[in-house]
Each structure stands twice: as structure tokens, then as C-alpha cells.
Image: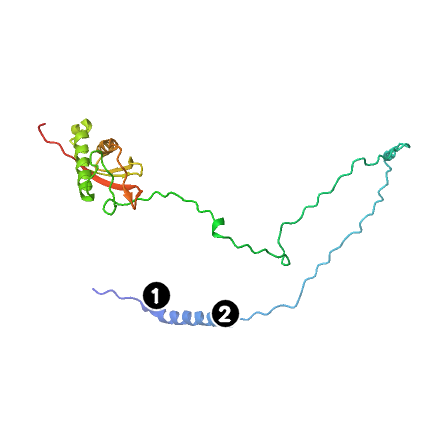
């Protein structure tokens, strides 16, 4: 069965009309708001400030009892009997002359002769390498012979000295320490060993190598052009132990 509606009581029958009317009203209100203008008013409000007259009061002058300032001190009394003592000792003035030379002062020319010049000889510590020195240091027991024989004897005696005084440090044996120590030293112009420097794997081995070289005997110093000179020399010392010893 189909339900029948009364068209007079239908709510949505005029909805489109209501919507159109409302939309037109909104457009009208928006247009009026955009077209509305305001103007500045020329009326200015003025306020009057009323200031009452100040009452001037007379301030009485009060005299304070201030003590007068102290009187000035009396002048110093000068004695009437002034004795004038004349200088009995005449002091001579010392005139200090300037030591500066001016443009008008003449300079004396002095030509020095050769006899007036003293030449002072300064001894220099000259170091001549072992390979180029004319006369190598003479080890005790290597006197005489040619230059090559003295060189061979020097190297042989040096090796014998190292082997004779060599002693393996006990601490190095405990630590199984071994290696090569390079020793650089100078045989000075007096024939003694000086300026010993070592370089090795450990300080213990370096100290032993320095001790061996410091025991070298005094030699006849090396000479260059007949004059005693310093000669640097280097030697390697091997520290090597055998297992089981």
C-alpha cells in the first residue's frame, strides 16, 4: 500500500525558492559592506587646563653666628745683624770639551804599515777524516813503516783492543739482547779519545761499547801538513751470544 503525502504540509516544496532569496540577500549585504564609506570628522575636542595661582611664601633670613676667620700669621722676624761671609776658596770651573766631530773638523790621515798590524794566531780545532788524513794516529806498537802499514796496524790494533776488553753485559744476556752498536769518537790533537757517541738497539749495549772505546790508550795524534789535528773515527761493535753457553 503506497503512503500518500499532503502537498500543503510538505516542508521541502519551496526550498529552492528560499535558497535563492537567501543567496540574494547575502550578495546584497556583501555589496553594501564594500561600498560603505567613512569620513574623518573635523570636530576637535579641546580641554582647558586650569592652573591655580601659586602662593609665594616669604622665607625669613636667619643670621647664623659664624666665627670670624683666624688672623694671618705674623711675618718672619729677620735678625738685624746679618753678616756677609766672603768666599775664601776660589773654585776653578772645569770646562768639558765635546768629543763629537763636526763637519768643519779636519781628520788626520794615518796610513798603517805592515809592522803596526799584529797578527794573532788562533788555534782552530780542525777535524780531518781518516780517509784523507796525511798521517793517521799512531797506535802504541805501530811506530815506523809506510802510511799504508800504519793504517793497517791502526785498524788491527783497534780490533784487538775491542776483542780484549769486550764483556757481554749480564743484564743483556738475561734479556737475550743482541745487536750492533755504532761508536763514533774523535782522536784529538793530543792523541786522546774524546766526544764518544753511540747508537744501538739498547742503552745497556751502548754503555758497554762506550766503556770499551774509553779504554783506548793515548796515541800519537794524526797530522795534516805537519800539524796535529783531530781525527773522527767510527767502528761497529757486534753483540751476539750463542745459545747454550
View extreme (front): residue:
115
The x and y percentages for residue 111 are 52, 55
**Viewer-nearest residue: 87 or 23:** 87
Q: Is residue 168 left or right of residue 229?
A: left
Closer to us: mark 1 or mark 2? Answer: 2
Q: Quadrant of residue 58?
A: top right
* Numbered disc total: 2
Q: What crowding class fits label 1: few (fewer than 14 Cα within 10 Å), some (14-19), or many (20 or more)?
A: few
Q: What residue sits 34% from the left and 65% below the top?
A: 11
In the image, residue 167 sits, relative to residue 147, either above or below, namely: above
**Element class at badge 2:** helix
Query: Which residue is labeled 1 in the image?
Result: 11
In the image, residue 47 sits, relative to residue 99, either above or below, namely: below
**Viewer-nearest residue: 67 or 124:** 124
Q: What residue sits 19% from the left and 32% below the top?
A: 161
Query: Which residue is labeled 2 in the image?
Result: 33
The x and y percentages for residue 132 are 24, 47
Q: What crowding class fits label 2: few (fewer than 14 Cα within 10 Å), some (14-19), or many (20 or more)?
A: few
Q: Give the mark nearer the N terminus: 1 vs 2.
A: 1
The x and y percentages for residue 72 are 86, 35
**Viewer-nearest residue: 136 or 174:** 136
The answer to whether any part of residue 22 appears in the image is yes
**Element class at badge 1:** helix
The x and y percentages for residue 92 are 74, 41
View extreme (left): residue:
244
Q: Is residue 151 left or right of residue 120?
A: left
Amino acid at each position: 500500500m503506497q503512503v500518500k503525502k499532503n502537498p500543503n504540509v510538505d516542508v521541502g516544496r519551496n526550498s529552492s525558492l528560499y535558497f535563492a532569496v537567501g543567496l540574494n540577500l547575502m550578495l546584497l549585504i556583501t555589496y553594501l559592506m564594500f561600498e560603505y564609506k567613512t569620513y574623518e570628522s573635523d570636530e576637535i575636542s579641546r580641554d582647558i587646563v586650569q592652573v591655580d595661582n601659586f602662593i609665594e611664601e616669604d622665607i625669613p633670613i636667619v643670621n647664623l653666628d659664624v666665627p670670624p676667620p683666624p688672623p694671618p700669621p705674623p711675618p718672619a722676624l729677620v735678625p738685624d745683624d746679618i753678616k756677609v761671609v766672603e768666599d775664601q776658596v776660589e773654585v776653578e770651573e772645569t770646562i768639558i770639551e765635546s768629543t763629537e766631530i763636526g763637519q768643519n773638523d779636519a781628520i788626520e790621515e794615518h796610513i798603517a804599515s805592515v809592522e803596526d798590524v799584529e797578527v794573532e794566531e788562533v788555534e782552530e780545532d780542525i777535524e780531518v777524516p781518516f780517509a784523507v788524513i796525511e798521517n793517521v794516529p799512531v797506535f802504541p806498537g805501530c811506530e815506523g813503516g809506510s802510511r799504508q802499514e800504519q793504517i793497517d796496524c791502526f785498524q788491527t790494533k783497534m780490533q784487538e783492543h775491542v776483542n780484549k776488553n769486550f764483556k757481554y753485559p749480564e743484564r743483556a744476556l738475561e734479556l737475550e739482547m743482541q745487536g750492533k752498536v755504532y761508536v763514533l769518537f774523535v782522536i784529538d790533537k793530543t792523541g786522546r779519545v774524546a766526544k764518544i757517541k753511540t747508537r744501538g738497539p739498547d742503552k745497556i749495549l751502548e754503555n758497554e761499547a762506550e766503556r770499551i772505546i774509553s779504554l783506548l790508550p793515548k796515541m800519537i795524534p794524526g797530522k795534516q801538513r805537519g800539524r796535529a789535528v783531530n781525527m773522527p773515527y767510527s767502528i761497529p761493535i757486534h753483540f751476539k751470544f750463542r745459545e747454550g753457553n
